[in-house]
């Protein structure tokens, strides 16, 4: 039973009420981390979505809002530290807005252009982009399990700029307005098949990763819940045998295929920029895997590109 929890701010001072450090009291058997954050919000006015809650030594972060307090490791009289992360946006909302942008951009640019003069390549490229981002929206709805509830609003706006402008507008304006394309280049249609293959492999990677993150039902014993939620699995299959971030690799290969099919300069630039960002994330994840799994993690795996990086 957890009766009292002391709360500090990140700068080190205790949060006080009427000149005294506050003690938050909760019934640990029926309350969750979210319940605790709501109680903190009543006093600090920091909304739960903006709270970064850790132990005093910052070795443990309480991100799983559904985790019951009696399974969280929090003890009576323990001091927790709360930081205000600033304006945030829910991960799911960010993804929906990000991916809806290129769909709307391509739809408008395509419809407002001279459709009578479009080549078969331009028409197929239109559907490649539309279906790519529809797939992402469906993955957000039915596949992805987010390890965090939100991201900083500033970062969300940068992501939207990346997809809406660099992808949707720049590629669309080049394909449908700024350039003319040859009508007979049938050999390039092999890249459409590659694009579909890489999209499928990317989807299977997301399903595999999602299966590792599904939360256990609370009907299991407390010990099983804690042990299995702490234990992550080493991903295998669908490219994970070669790289730690196979989903990023197949994503990149899909855009490489699109770029080769369209010969779009904007698509090439978008692909290079996206690859650079995903490579940063892949290297970070690769280091986390090695640190977490130690000798059990395959040493021959690369971060993102098989046999290279």
Image: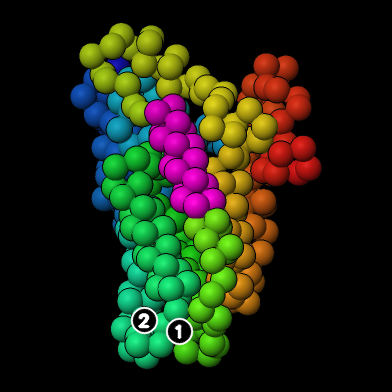
User: In the image, is residue 201 part of the stretch drawn in magenta?
Assistant: yes
Residue linked to disc 1: 176
Question: Dot 1, how many residues are within 10 Å of its Cα: few (below 14), some (14-19), or many (20+)?
Answer: many
Q: Position of residue 83 (x, y in %)?
A: 47, 50
Q: Position of residue 197 (x, y in %)?
A: 49, 46
Q: Report the magenta residues as a range.
A: 193-213
Identify which residue is drawn at 21% across, 24% down.
30
Q: Which mark is residue 110?
A: 2
Q: Mark 1 falls on what kind of element?
A: helix
Would residue 114 be seen by someone viewing this image from the given angle? yes
Q: Position of residue 85 (x, y in %)?
A: 46, 56
Q: Position of residue 117 (x, y in %)?
A: 40, 88
Identify which residue is drawn at 36% across, 59% down.
131
Question: Dot 2, how many residues are within 10 Å of its Cα: few (below 14), some (14-19), or many (20+)?
Answer: many
Kindly indicate the quadrant of the structure image that contains residue 111: bottom left
- Please count the marks in the image: 2
Identify which residue is drawn at 54% across, 32% down.
238
The reply to whether the C-beta atoms of the residues labelled 2 and 1 are less than 8 Å apart is yes
253 relative to 169 in the view: left or right: right
Residue 298 or 151: which is nearer the viewer? 298
Is residue 282 shown above or below 252? above
Q: Main secondary structure of the magenta part?
A: helix
Kindly indicate the quadrant of the structure image that contains residue 28: top left
């Amino acid at each position: 039973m957890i009766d009292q929890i002391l709360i500090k701010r990140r700068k080190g001072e205790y949060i006080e009420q009427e000149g005294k450090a506050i003690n938050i009291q909760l019934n640990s058997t029926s309350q969750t981390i979210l319940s605790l954050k709501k109680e903190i919000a009543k006093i600090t006015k920091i909304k739960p979505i903006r709270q970064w809650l850790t132990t005093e030594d910052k070795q443990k972060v309480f991100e799983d809002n559904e985790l019951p307090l009696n399974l969280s490791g929090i003890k009576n009289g323990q001091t927790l530290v709360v930081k205000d992360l600033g304006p945030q946006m829910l991960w799911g909302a960010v993804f929906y807005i990000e991916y809806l942008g290129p769909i709307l951009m391509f739809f408008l640019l395509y419809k407002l252009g001279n459709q009578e003069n479009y080549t078969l390549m331009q028409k197929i490229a239109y559907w490649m982009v539309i279906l790519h981002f529809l797939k992402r929206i469906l993955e957000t709805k039915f596949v992805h399990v987010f390890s965090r509830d939100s991201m900083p609003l500033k970062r969300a706006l940068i992501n939207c700029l990346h997809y809406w402008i660099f992808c949707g507008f720049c590629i669309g304006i080049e394909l449908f307005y700024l350039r003319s394309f040859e009508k007979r280049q049938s050999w390039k249609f092999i890249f459409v098949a590659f694009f579909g293959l890489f999209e499928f492999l990317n989807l299977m990677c997301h399903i595999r990763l999602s299966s590792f993150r599904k939360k256990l039902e609370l009907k299991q014993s407390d010990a099983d819940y804690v042990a299995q939620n702490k234990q992550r699995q080493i991903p295998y299959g669908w490219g994970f045998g070669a790289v730690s971030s196979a989903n990023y690799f197949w994503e990149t290969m899909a855009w490489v295929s699109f770029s080769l099919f369209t010969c779009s300069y904007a698509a090439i630039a978008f692909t290079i920029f996206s690859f650079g960002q995903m490579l940063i994330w892949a290297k970070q994840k690769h280091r986390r895997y090695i640190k977490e799994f130690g000798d059990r993690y395959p040493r021959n795996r690369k971060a993102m590109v098989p046999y290279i990086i």
